[in-house]
Image: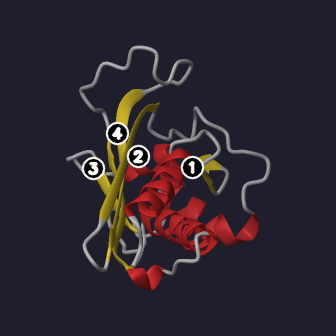
Amino acid sequence: MISRKKLRHVAAGLLASFISRNNDLAGYWAPGLLYRECGADLCVRLNLLAPGPAPSPRIATAAARQYGEFLQRALSRHGLHLEQLAHAEIALRFDADIALNDVGRGWIGEPFVCTVTLTAQDGRAARAQGIRRCARYDPGRFTGRAHSGGPAFEPLLNGAIGGDDD
């Protein structure tokens, strides 16, 4: 059985990592890439237990896999296993109608809400939520980090970001 305290701790760690400026995917900020690829509803849901292809097979799946691995490591530090979870999700709502005050000072873009939800097999649940600013990825405006992830991410960048459709 997973205690709520441990669930809350893991959910808070996932949230802090996901909305940090160091959350990069292929050398680019993952929320900006997801914002660019989201649908008209401006929402993205990443299933960390079974990464799926929506909204973009490349970007959302890569982000879900990356944070699924993060979740697995975080759980193992508490002596827990993925199999003890019934649900693990990161949900993003972009262009949120929220006043930020001093939250995200120095960041550019529109407000977005990030919610991490973890539910254990026995029904215990934890939720962590944070608000930041995010600009859609724009290849002419943003350059990637020098350590872009190497050849493993070339299909991600060339297909999803470069605009080539399969």
- Which quadrant is home to the N terminus? bottom left
* Residue at position x 36%, y 72% in the image: 53
- Circle number at residue 113: 4
* Residue at position x 30%, y 33% in the image: 95
Q: Nearer the viewer, residue 120 or 58?
A: 120
Measure the alpha-carbon separation of dots 4 and 2: 15 Å
Q: Residues within 10 Å of mark 4 (few under 14, many from 20)?
A: many
Measure the alpha-carbon separation of dots 4 and 1: 14 Å
- Circle number at residue 17: 1
Q: What percent of the width, then of the height, locates residue 136?
A: 44, 38
Which of marks 1 and 2 precedes in the sequence? 1
Residue type at numbered disc 1: Ser
Measure the alpha-carbon separation of dots 2 and 1: 20 Å
Q: Residues within 10 Å of mark 3 (few under 14, many from 20)?
A: many
Q: Residues within 10 Å of mark 1 (few under 14, many from 20)?
A: few
* Camera-side mark, 1 or 3: 1
Quarter where residue 50 is shown? bottom left
Measure the alpha-carbon separation of dots 3 and 2: 11 Å
Residue type at numbered disc 3: Cys
Q: Nearer the viewer, residue 166 or 106?
A: 106
- Above or below — where is 42 with respect to 87? above
- Circle number at residue 43: 3
Badges 1 and 3: C-beta atoms under 8 Å apart?
no
Q: Residues within 10 Å of mark 2 (few under 14, many from 20)?
A: some
Report helix, strand or loop for mark 4.
strand
Residue 164 appearing in the image: no
